[in-house]
Amino acid sequence: TAPDCPLLGALNHQLIADEHHPDPMTIAELTERMRGFMAGGYTAILFEKGDEVVAYALYHPFEETDLYLHQFFVVRGKRREGLGRQAMELLFAEVFPTGKRIVVTAL
């Protein structure tokens, strides 16, 4: 949702840094980009452990039969705990519609 965009922008900034991507966008610019994604039909899911956000997924419908998983990120310091796997299991069990093909590009 729109109120989550500043947090999503900050998480996206971490994702870009962790990929060593040369993207020079600031957190403010990434926040605005997230607002554009939300306005354009994307959905963001935040995953929490206790009161802490530990991961997020950003996806949108892609053609009639597919969903495109645009971003998936587990925060630093919470990796190697199985949280990414748990988040993906939740996405497939409770979020993604049955019968949709999931399209992913990996960097």
Image (cartoon, helix red, strand yellow):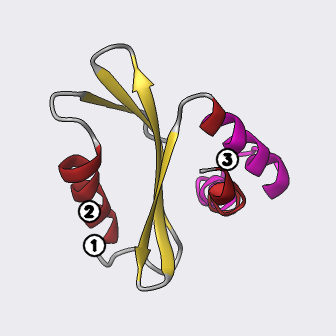
In the image, taking residue 78 as reference, residue 80 lies left or right, namely left
Question: Which of the labelled discs sits on residue 105, or is there none?
Answer: none
In the image, taking residue 7 as reference, residue 49 lies left or right, namely left
Three-letter amino acid code at the position of disc 1 = Gly
Residue 41 in percent (x, y) is at 54, 30
Residue 107 in percent (x, y) is at 49, 42
- Residue in the foreground of this view, choosing between 58 and 4: 4
x 23%, y 52%: residue: 94
Residue 51 in percent (x, y) is at 48, 84
Q: How many marks?
A: 3
Q: Secondary structure at mark 2?
A: helix
Question: Which of the labelled discs sits on residue 85, or is there none?
Answer: 2
Q: Are marks 3 and 1 in contact (CB under 8 Å)?
A: no
Mark 1, residue position: 82
Q: Is residue 34 visible?
A: yes
In whole angstroms, how far apart are the C-alphas of marks 3 and 1?
25 Å
Mark 3, residue position: 21
